[in-house]
Image: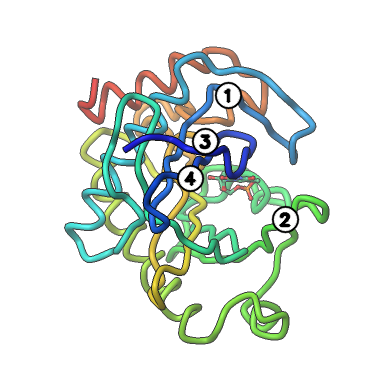
Amino acid sequence: MEKKELLYEGKAKKVYTTEDPDVLIVSYKDDATAFNGLKKGTIVGKGAVNNRMTNFIFKKLEAKGVPTHLVEELNDRETVVKKVEIIPLEVIIRNYSAGSFAKKMGMEEGIKFACPTLEFSYKNDDLGDPFINSYYALALELATQDEIDKITEYAFKVNEVLKEYFDRLNIDLIDFKIEFGRYHNQVILADEISPDTCRLWDKDTHEKLDKDRFRRDLGGVEDAYEEVFRRLGIR
Ligand code: TMP
């Protein structure tokens, strides 16, 4: 499978067309941004970690009944994926207080919830991805009720699978963001699952092993990505 034309360049990935109209090639970059692109930098090796980690996790999710866009990993940074129409919702699941939740609720970070939360943001860079609920999504026709039901079911399933998996790596899954797409009338998991899109804390030390190290200038950014990679056993 060969790349043809650059279809889209996002903050962390490039997407290319191929000779097959049904599939695309995603190429992961080392570029990192935060705060809606205001902060820019490079995390050396991130593209390869995120590509291989996403594919590794997506295969596990497929085996547990969550359909994904994964077709085939081509190399360290590039993967063939099904061409979906992205549903413009960022789906966030939280198991512990952190980030925008902790700020909004006036709580310290790291408090375990009685049960996981699910929230939606409207994927719109100009508006800074505002928090919305399912009524907004329906009213603005961002998704149908059936799609929202499927997204909710899959998102909690992803949480269960990932929580259990990271548990064995001595990592607490604090929260994460996922995105879904439409593919031949089906809702499937798309985009990525990586230290860019999850909060991952070491269970013993509570050390942050994710992009918060970049967002908050904590140092050791590359080492954190490598450490997650190492614990997953992909390296
Ligand atoms: P938040 O606490 O800043 O709302 O972030 C919740 C989760 O979503 C966290 O794991 C980081 C992830 N996330 C993204 O993947 N992309 C984003 O643009 C933002 C703001 C958060």
Per the rendering, the mark at residue 129 is 2
**Label 3 belongs to which residue?**
196
**Residue at 46% across, 85% down:** 146
Query: How far apart in space, not on screen, are marks 3 and 1 (Cα)?
Result: 10 Å
The residue type indicated by label 3 comes to Asp
**Residue at 48% across, 54% down:** 178
Of circles 3 and 1, the one toward us is: 3
**Residue at 65% across, 53% down:** 101
Of circles 3 and 4, the one toward us is: 4
Element type at mark 1:
helix
Residue 169 sits above or below residue 123 on the image: above
CB of mark 3 near ligand 1 (< 8 Å): yes
**Label 4 belongs to which residue?**
17
x%, y% of residue 208? Answer: 49, 28
> Is 149 displayed left or right of 133 in the figure?
left
Query: How far apart in space, not on screen, are marks 4 and 1 (Cα)?
Result: 33 Å
Question: Which numbered disc flags the more N-terminal residue, 2 or 1?
Answer: 2
**Label 1 belongs to which residue?**
213
Question: Which numbered disc flags the more N-terminal residue, 4 or 2?
Answer: 4
